[in-house]
Each structure stands twice: as C-alpha cells, then as structure tokens.
Image (spheres, grey):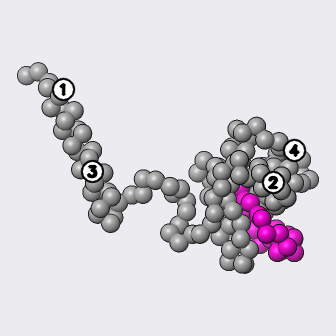
Amino acid sequence: MPIRWRRTIAILAAGLVLGLAWNAWSGRGIALAGNAFIREGDVAEEIEVGEARARLDRGALFLDARPIDFYKMSHVPAALPLPEDDFDRSFRALEDRLRTHFDIIVYCSGYGCEASHIVARRLAEKKIHAAILNEGWPAWTDAGYPVKEGPQP
C-alpha cells in the first residue's frame, strides 16, 4: 500500500490549523507571541537596543539585574548593579539616586532571563518606573555598543 503524500500533508495541515484555532479560541491556550516572562497586568515598558542606546546618550540610568559577578565581568558603561538576587540590600544603597532619575533602564542576561522583569516590578512597587531592555545584555553586545569591565560603573 503506497503512501499518499498529498493526503498525508493535507491531514497534517488540517490538524495544525485546527490545533492553532483551538489554542486561540478555547480560553485555555498557550500564548504563542510575546514574552513568556511578562505576567498578565505587568505594565513595564520594553524598549529595543537602539532606543536604549539613545537614552544612554541622553543620560538614562542603567541598572544591571544580573548577579554581581556578571556585572564585574562587563556591563553597560555607567550602569549600576541592582542584582535581582540581592535586591533589598542593593536598593537601599541606590534608593536616593533611583528616586531622582526619571529615565531608568533595567537589563539582565536576556534570552529567557526574568531578572530585569522582577527588578522592574519591584521598583514599580516602590513607585519607581523603569523600562526593560528587550533581550538584555546579548542585544547590547550584539549591537556592538560599548561595554565596561570591572566593578566600577
């Protein structure tokens, strides 16, 4: 019995279409677009790397949400460390500066890193708005923008 390729492809295509339709209209489907780490109701602004660079040139304050050892290896020039895993202590040290800046951008390790979203959410709870650099550190380095090494901003 020979395989009928057209019929097989038609059945697979129909199954795919019906599956996607069910996912979209059932109310219980999986989100297929957007960032999986943004919870429903999050209002954090996500910006692309070009916009982030332009804001840096205009004096924006960058916060590095990665662990402190990653920050020490390299970071965005003038960025301050605000690691998600040590948020409370780091926030107390930076609070005065954060409350006087109105253009704050948070980044993390990108490609699945949730730390920048957590830090931005925690800042929002303290009434401090921060934008999130979409795809974080890899987006910055892939764009060829400057980096700084060492523990100093």
Question: Image point 68% across, 74% down: which residue?
Answer: 124
Residue lying farthest bottom? 126
Can you identify the residue that label 2 sits on? 56
Q: Secondary structure at mark 1?
A: helix
Task: Quote the CA–CA distance across marks 2 and 4.
Answer: 17 Å
Label 3 environment density (alpha carbons within 10 Å; few <14, some 14–19, many ≥20): few
The tag earlier along the polypeptide, 4 or 3, is 3
Rendered view: 68 above or below 10: below
The tag earlier along the polypeptide, 1 or 2, is 1
Looking at the picture, which amino acid does disc 3 mark?
Answer: Gly
Quarter of the figure with the N terminus: top left
Please report the bounds of the magenta region as a residue range. Answer: 83-108
Q: Are the residues tagged 1 and 2 within 8 Å (C-beta)?
A: no
Closer to us: mark 2 or mark 4? Answer: 2
The tag earlier along the polypeptide, 2 or 3, is 3
Of residue 80 and residue 128, the one placed in the foreground of this image is 128
Is residue 93 magenta-colored? yes
The tag earlier along the polypeptide, 2 or 4, is 2
Question: Image point 24% across, 39% down: which residue?
Answer: 13
Closer to us: mark 4 or mark 3? Answer: 3
Q: Which mark is residue 149?
A: 4
Q: Secondary structure at mark 4?
A: loop
Can you identify the residue that label 3 sits on? 19
Asked if residue 133 can be seen in this view, the reply is yes
Looking at the picture, which amino acid does disc 1 mark?
Answer: Trp
Rendered view: 100 above or below 108: below
The tag earlier along the polypeptide, 4 or 1, is 1
